[in-house]
Amino acid sequence: MELNIASIEIEPKRHTFGHIAERFGEDRPASRYEEAIYDGQATENFHYRPQWEPEFEIYDVRRTKIVMSDWYKLLDPRKFHYMSYVSTRAKDNSTSEQNFEFIEKRGLVSKITQANKNKIYKYLTSLRHYEYGANLNNLTIVSRGYGTALDSASLFYATDSLGMAQHITKIILLVSDNDVSKLDEGKNDWLNDSMWQGLRKALEDILIIKDPIELLIAQNVIFDGMVLPLLINNFAKEMADNGEITIGMLTEFITSWQEETVKWLDSIVKVMAEESVENKSLLEQWSSKYMSIIYDALEEPSKYSLNAEEILSSLRNDLILRLNKNCLLNI
Amino acid sequence: MSKSIALLCIQATDEGRTIAEAIREDNEGVVITNKPAMIQIEREGRIVVNAETVSEALGRDWEPEELQLVLISTGGQIDETDDEFIVYWNN
């Protein structure tokens, strides 16, 4: 008997979902990102308007002054959907874990001088509460923004902010040998120390912004664009200048997270600015408004360095240059 | 005399499809065929996989050595550097 093993090729009837194919104009295989993002949000047949805001539909493009012909233009260059996001963060975390282990194994924490430890407690601990505010603000963007492309990436940003707060907690506990009272002191500083009140006010003021894109500019582009470089990157650099290099290793997670995340921010802000002159001028107005607020708010916390003013103004110039080069904004 | 056909077969995973799209961008006249669970890529003379294009398409840094993770088969000689992976025939 002769056995014939033949292979047949089965052409799938569809290569992707109908609504994705409609968007492409052809039925071709779509990436997981495209399938996860495009037209995920309901757009019609809303039965009831929200009682707390009856002038809007539950998902409504009019919640922001920014006008887009299609909110799904705000694509994420990192292509984050659940799986790619989670696996990227898992990788980031295991790198950070290794840094922590390196320091723990060699007992490097015991080599940190008390003066440097006090500086770390003073300038780093309270940022946990700043990051929590960033988390809340991004959840507001998620609930008020339009379209899955913007919402899912903002949700990742919100989760990351919470992660940053936890990350700072880990650093403080490592440095203080698990002394949780340091965390309470940090909270007390955030609430009562005059050094933090400017930043706290700036952050709490934007908690109530209703326009999701204005909030995105204020929190993610401007505030985080100044606070993290100043109080994480430059602070680590300052510590290194004072002979303490471990802080740079411990905060590397936050630094590299920001390097990655600004690619998304720059790309969506640019798309919105290119859409229309009105959008561009709104984005510019918001950027310069919140830039001057955060600049004043950071005057006190930047005093860990003797050249505080110089650092702060060079960070502002860097950010303005970045927005100009990557997002076409003139501020 | 026409040149031989350089061949690259990669798995039809999400990443594989993205790499195939990047290859299409950089190689004019390339023929990409979707086979069951596999993407067959053919071009006369040579196929270049450019790390920069793939990185941009994937949204993360990608190195040519990662091609091995989705690679099924090749037809031709291979040149691999930090920036590109080339399959070619020298005739």
Image (tube, coloured by chain):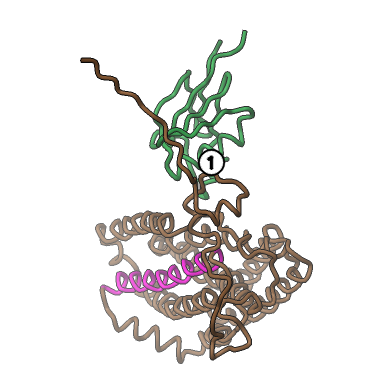
**Of B38 and A199, the residue lying toward us:** B38
**Of A153 and A101, the residue lying toward us:** A153
Which residue is label 1 attached to? B54
Q: Looking at the rendering, in which quadrant would you find the N terminus of chain A? A: top left
Is residue A108 part of the magenta span, yes or no? no
Circle 1 Cα neighbour tier, 10 Å, few/some/many (<14 / 14–19 / ≥20):
many
Q: Looking at the colours in the rendered structure, which chain would you say is drawn in green?
A: B
Identify which residue is drawn at 61% across, 30% down: B27
Is residue A162 part of the magenta span, yes or no? yes
Magenta segment, which residues? A149-177
**Chain A representation colour:** brown
Seen as rendered, the residue at the extreme right is A277
Q: Chain of mark 1?
A: B
Question: At which x and y percent is residue A202?
Answer: 58, 84
Residue A316, image quadrant: bottom right
Identify which residue is drawn at 44% across, 68% down: A160
Question: At which x and y percent is residue B26?
Answer: 61, 33
Task: Give the side of residue A64 with respect to residue A133, left or right.
Answer: right
Question: At which x and y percent is residue A229?
Answer: 54, 67
Task: Give the side of residue A310 with respect to residue A232, left or right.
Answer: right
Q: Is residue B84 above or below residue B3?
A: below
* Mark 1: amino acid: Val
Identify which residue is drawn at 60% across, 84% down: A209
